[in-house]
Amino acid sequence: MTVRRLSAGLVAAALITPALAACASGGTGTAGSTATPTVTASGAASPSSGAPVAGDAKQALLDSTKEISNGNFRFALTAVGSTVEGQVHQPSQSAAMKIAIGGPSSDLAMKLDVIHYKPDSWVKLELTGPTANSLPAIKQLNLGKYQHLDQARIKGNRNLGFDFDKVDPAGSAVLTQGITEVRSTGTGAYAGTIDVTKAAEAGSLNAATIAALGTQAKTVPFSAKVDPQGRLSELVLQLPAAGQTAAQEIKMTYADYGTATAAQKPPADQVVEAPAELYSLFN
């Protein structure tokens, strides 16, 4: 197996930058009281609600993502066997994230420590498991050091690059625009359904997963929470079962709005130039 074939089996089927593809845990149903009026995407109460809705729940969620565009927050994304956590700091044009795919018992597992400090990017990669151990080329990637990336070679690469014009790794603003039905389930809490057919653009799901959902992709259950300032703090997608894939959950959280710190550049003595094999893995 070559490094390029390895990438097809791991990276393309996994995630990111840093977006989790749908290898997630079986989710539970979305919480919420059936007595709470439902709001359609237009914000109007459904005919069965029996009473006007106090405020516009969809608009509240659309507004909740505005602070994300300022690019100063911490975030996390989780799915079964995969996690991403990090920070974005637009004032310094920097971002950092740690990504893990698979675990100790996996045939192939990957950890990435990625740092962006415009105009530079670095990645420290660790591939483990029987498959990784059987590939001589992996030794050139598991260096234990940060590998400096050629920006010309990662341009447009969502696995290694970062677009400081689109600072939300999960694309929550795009996702909330796809809300088809929503209701308030309590103070700062919402639930409903969302059309995730544009989620690949957002970065939260890969195109293959969306295609596998078929018509179910138009009405994926979700729940969301906002903080006391009305800013999005949690968004959870409950993907239904599709084909051979069990029901799945993808969870995104945001915190520390306005108080995140700049990423730290790796020490010079811990940096080497990335070899060709690294670009082959992610391209």
Image: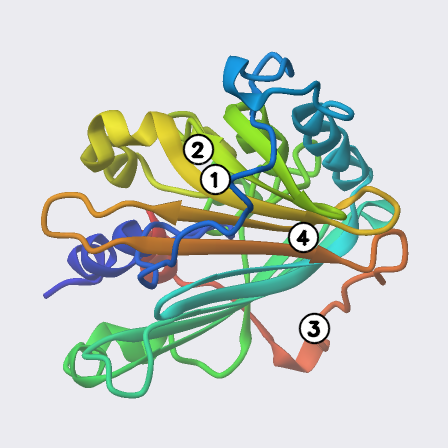
Q: Give left or right: position of 222 versus 70.
A: left
Residue ID for mark 2: 199
| Mark 4 → mark 1, Cα distance in angstroms | 22 Å
Task: Name the residue at 36% across, 50% down.
Answer: 21
Check the image and report above or below for 1 versus 202.
Answer: below
Task: Give the mark toward the camera: 4 or 1.
Answer: 1
| Mark 4 → mark 2, Cα distance in angstroms | 28 Å
> Residue 61 falls in which quadrant of the image?
top right
Check the image and report above or below for 217 versus 141.
Answer: above
Residue ID for mark 4: 120
Task: Give the mark toward the camera: 4 or 2.
Answer: 2
Q: Give left or right: position of 173 versus 29.
A: right
Task: Name the residue at 54% across, 32% down.
Answer: 175
For numbered disc 1, what is the local secondary structure?
loop
Task: Name the residue at 52% across, 63% down.
Answer: 84
| Mark 2 → mark 1, Cα distance in angstroms | 6 Å
Q: Amino acid at mark 3?
A: Pro
Residue ID for mark 1: 203
Q: Amino acid at mark 4?
A: Asp
Q: Amino acid at mark 2?
A: Ala
Q: Residues within 10 Å of mark 1 (few under 14, many from 20)?
A: many
Do labels 2 and 1 touch, CB within 8 Å? yes
> Can the viewer see residue 177?
yes
Q: Residues within 10 Å of mark 2 (few under 14, many from 20)?
A: many
Q: Which residue ends up furthest to the front in the rendered image?
A: 50
Task: Give the mark toward the camera: 3 or 1.
Answer: 1
For numbered disc 2, what is the local secondary structure?
helix
**Label whose residue precedes the other's in the sequence (4 or 2):** 4
User: Can you tell which mark lies on residue 266?
Assistant: 3
For numbered disc 3, what is the local secondary structure?
loop
